[in-house]
Image: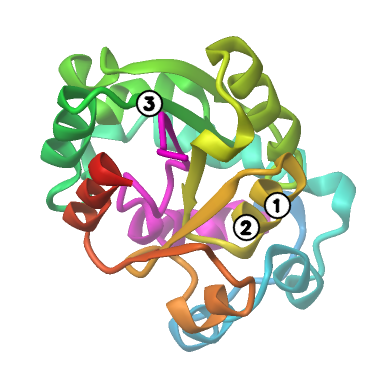
Amino acid sequence: MSIRLAIFDFDGTLADSFPFFMSVFNEIADQHGFRRVDAQQAERLRHYGPRDIMRHVGMPAWKLPLASRSFIERMRENTARIPLFDGVGEMLRELVRSGLELAVVSSNSEQNVRQVLGPDLAALVRQYECGMSVFGKAARIRKVLRVAGVAPAQALYVGDQTTDADAARKAGVAFGAVSWGYAPIEALRRSEPQHEFTAPGDLLSLRCA
């Protein structure tokens, strides 16, 4: 069955926001009382899942929404500093030209996502489901499917973290792992993705899926 709906994570998948995230991480850590990380630790933590990272920095689960809100607020004030990955814009345009429907499911805010995409690319996205916990994406993926009227077998969730793979599996859709995001592709392979993409242009193969 061919892919009719491509659902994207945002940070680390469409937008290269990790450098900005690291530039404000220690400020947010001080604000909410968890441990700072240096550059060497940050590189090592890329191989960890979000829950392991939270344990490493001493962040209890109840602080995650507060820390996430702080990051989103800082990003809202600095969206001009957040680039899209090279090739993302043309990839999104080509997928729409080929007849695929696009959606974004992201723990970031819809406002931030739209600002970074810019008005032309933002208008290509039919559905935005944003602002949930990184552990709450499965329900939003299911909502996107329901609104689009697309069967799970005809959809793909594209992301850069193991939580994205978990959400796709829970929602019953295939997972496409990107190699340019936060988690190394070696870590994502342990989640057994159905697709791997080494560059945004590789997603154009979905046109013939």
Q: What range is drawn magenta here? A: 1-30
* Residue 42: image location, x then y, percent: 51, 78
User: Which residue does the numbered mark 2 point to in the structure image?
Assistant: 165
Amino acid at circle 1: Arg
Q: Find residue 68 and report its horizontal and vertical position in percent.
A: 64, 41
The residue that label 3 is drawn on is 102
The answer to whether mark 1 and mark 2 are in CB contact below 8 A is yes
Which residue is identified by label 1? Answer: 169
Left or right of 103, for residue 14? left
Q: Is residue 111 left or right of residue 193?
A: left
For the point 15% across and 37% down, which residue is it?
89
* Disc with the residue nearer the chain's start (3 vs 1): 3
Name which quarter of the figure residue 149 lies in.
top right
Amino acid type, callout 2: Ala
Position of 87 relative to 183 (above/below): above
Residue 63 x %, y %: 81, 47
- Which marked residue is nearer to the observer: mark 1 or mark 2? 1
Labels 3 & 1 near each other (Cβ < 8 A): no
Task: Identify the secondary structure beneath mark 3.
Answer: strand
Helix or strand or loop: what does disc 1 sit on?
Answer: helix
As measured in the structure, the alpha-carbon distance from the residue carrying label 3 to the one carrying label 1 is: 19 Å
Viewer-nearest residue: 16 or 152? 152
Image point 26% across, 12% down: which residue?
123
In the image, residue 203 lies in the stretch drawn in magenta = no
- Residue drawn where x is 37% and y is 26% of the image: 102
Residue under the point 50% across and 80% down: 38
User: Is residue 21 on the magenta stretch?
Assistant: yes
Task: Please rate how many residues cluster around mark 1, counting C-alpha atoms within 10 Å: few if below 14, some from 14 to 19, many from 20.
Answer: some
User: The disc labelled 3 sits on which kind of residue?
Assistant: Leu
